[in-house]
Image (cartoon, rainbow, N blue to C red):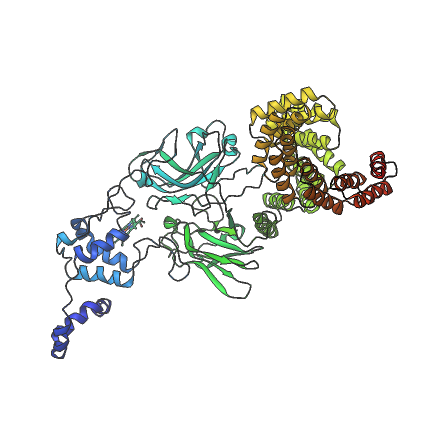
Amino acid sequence: MRFLRCILLALVCFAILCRLHPHCATHAATVPANPPVTWSRQIAPIVYQNCTTCHHPGGSGPFSLLTYPEAYRRGPQMAEVTQSRFMPPWLPAPGYGDFLGTRRLSDAQVALIRSWVESGMPEGDASAAPAAPHYDATWQLGKPDLILTIEHPYTLTASGSDVFRNFVLPYPLAATHYIHAMEILPSAPQVVHHANVLIDRTASFRRSHPTDWQLGVPGMELELDAGNTFDPDSHFLFWKPDTPVLEEPEGMPWRLDAGNDLILNMHLKPSGKPETISAQIGLYFTADPPAKHPMLLQLEDDRDLDIPAGDRNFVVQDELKLPVDVDVFGIYPHAHYLGKELDGWAILPNGRKQWLIRIPNWDIDRQSVYRYRTPVFLPRGTVLHMHYLYDNSADNIHNPNSPPIRVCAGNRSVDEMAHLWLQVLPVNVPKGSPDPRLQLEQAWMEHRVEKNPGDLIALYNLASARAGLGHYAEAAADYRKILAGHPGDARTLNSLGAALENAGDAPGAEEAFKQAIASGADTCDPQFNLAQLELKNSKFAQAEEQFRDLLRQCKGDAETHNGLAIALEGEGDSAPAQAEFERALELDSSNFTALYHLGEMAIESGQPERAVDLLEKAIAQHPDDVDARERLAMGYAQSGRQDDALTQLRAAVRIKPGDANLHALLSQVLAGTGQLEQAIEEQNQALHLQPDDADGWNNLGVLEARTGNKTAAREDFQHALQLAPGHAQARANLARLAQP
Ligand code: HEC
């Protein structure tokens, strides 16, 4: 034992030996004797850097280490827990992933604490000590832009097992906001072990707990309904009392829309006295929408979790091949009390092994999200691996069961889990390709279905990802598989209808929508889709009836009013159609469809100023819509703003250079401003794209004639007549050319 100590204290031993051995004396003359390690010079800086974020009054650590007397009292214990690496708490092994905020003392720092303790923990020159850091329970980034508060505080009993509680915090604003930072301030941080914030896009949790959601709902993990649009979870909104405020990387804020709920999932630990727990969530907005769209991916194999009592080496693994290049931003390993060794790595296509994380001594109480200092690039074809070892023996000090019992997967903390979450950002995405996250979703869900063909949520998500990628027939086949087991499932029938419609099977789609409506559950979506299908097939009267029914039975949103308007327009009732578009615009002032149609109506009724106003707003919504730009150009031209009209049309031609009509229209406006050479050029472009257009040849002839090029004009008129012998204007123009 003594020998061991001496090894550990090599520094100190050496110094002593030097002084004892005479032949060291010459060195001693040039090398100053090591001054003793003191609190003020060496230890306080280490403690303030690495310990006091938790060890301050009110912090998550069980005592304060802010002052010399406090540290003095704990000195030997500090030496012990830093030597054993129990403190500061940090699970990942060094060298297996370079994480932000790594909490690990260097060997030299550990040795310094040890020698300080060995030499009696001297304070040293108090005036040389750094100022103690200041901690308070206020917002770290200043006042948040929005603070959400738990409405009904929860009372945690003095003792008993851990409590998992979900608090619903409705997002109260009407406008969408982007959040670049979030902080949680619980009223009793000492009992809040950690918290997750989930975004419920469809308020599904609240709907599934209609009577008690205000009070908070127990449960460790929850399943939320993501709705009909692909909007995957993209951020780790994980929080622990001692972690700094969560700031998202540049260009990667997350989003809250009207009607969203935040769900604060808190893990509470009874502390010996009852505590009333409330919490505030502070949100910091940024004006810029996300430029990068990450996604959370999960490796897991909960189904394999069936750990016999006493088994100390139970392995669970999973792997997933990446279909796209990604940067990995963060990682979140998760197991419960029996987890022992949690490893994650990637095998690159060239065979190289890239470690993502290695946790040699798992401890659920110290779980955390880890963010890489620099994102880890993984090319497509890389295979992600999860390899977890569980210890269900009595030797596992975290084992909640004594004696050990068989443990399976489950939602309670005494059950087990095997999850490895990664936050990935697809990179090197070819321009014009569909959302690369759909490819990730497809690969992930395919893998889930492979592992467990009965996983209907995965099958549904897989089908939806396929539909999103344009593989409609495959998607329809998957939806049918679900329906084979759950005939009449309204949502699946509705999705099947949409896939069939996109696959070009209108009758099949109609039947699926009708079956979904007949199922009686959730009829609004399929009815809306059926009405849209009828519009597409020009069954305007039927569509009108459906839309009117929707307005009575379901919500009267802008798109329903638009649908009714288009049906009415199709039936020739333009005044009531206009009124419906106006109603849609009242409900949603930036609704493209309403702006576009009302703009078009304004042009037709000779109100170019109003048309310009509406269509400018429409283009602000969809800058790439050439039809809207074309109509806006007409509005400008009608109001005498020829230059603006030209600018619009040139922009439209840039977006869609292969559109003959745009070139022809541009030619007309150019001709109107006397720019004949350019007008001829554009008309030639149009005819190059659409050589059989007799009107086009006639127009080209007129332009040639105006520049005095009679030969060219004659050929153009003749060409028009060859294509359309009855073309009266071309014949008249040709005749006029012949006159002197
Ligand atoms: C992230 C928060 C955090 C940091 C940072 C931290 N501690 Fe702790 N410390 C705790 C908590 C919490 C406990 C209570 C035991 C537990 O839950 O792990 C604790 C317990 C201790 C104990 C008592 C150990 C025991 O066996 O009871 C000592 C001593 C200690 N810490 C010293 C330190 C020192 C020294 C540092 C810095 C080198 C440090 N801690 C950094 C949170 C922290």
Q: Position of residue 111 (x, y in %)?
A: 24, 63
Q: Position of residue 520 (x, y in %)?
A: 65, 28
Residue 160 is at least partly visible in this image: yes
Identify the residue at image location x=67%, y=20%. 576
Q: Position of residue 506 (x, y in %)?
A: 75, 37
Residue 192, placed above or below residue 448: above
What is the residue that sits farthest to the front in this orientation? 740
Q: Nearer the viewer, residue 130 or 706?
A: 706
- Tell whether 379 sits left or right of 459: left
Identify the residue at image location x=45%, y=41%. 220
Report the quarter where the N terminus lies.
Answer: bottom left
Residue 142, placed above or below residue 109: above
Residue 87: image quadrant is: bottom left
Identify the residue at image location x=52%, y=50%. 297
Q: Nearer the viewer, residue 468 or 632?
A: 632
Residue 458: image quadrant is: top right
Q: Position of residue 348 (x, y in %)?
A: 53, 62
Q: Nearer the viewer, residue 266 or 150?
A: 150
Identify the residue at image location x=57%, y=55%. 324
- Tell whether 644 sits left or right of 186: right
Residue 386 is at least partly visible in this image: no
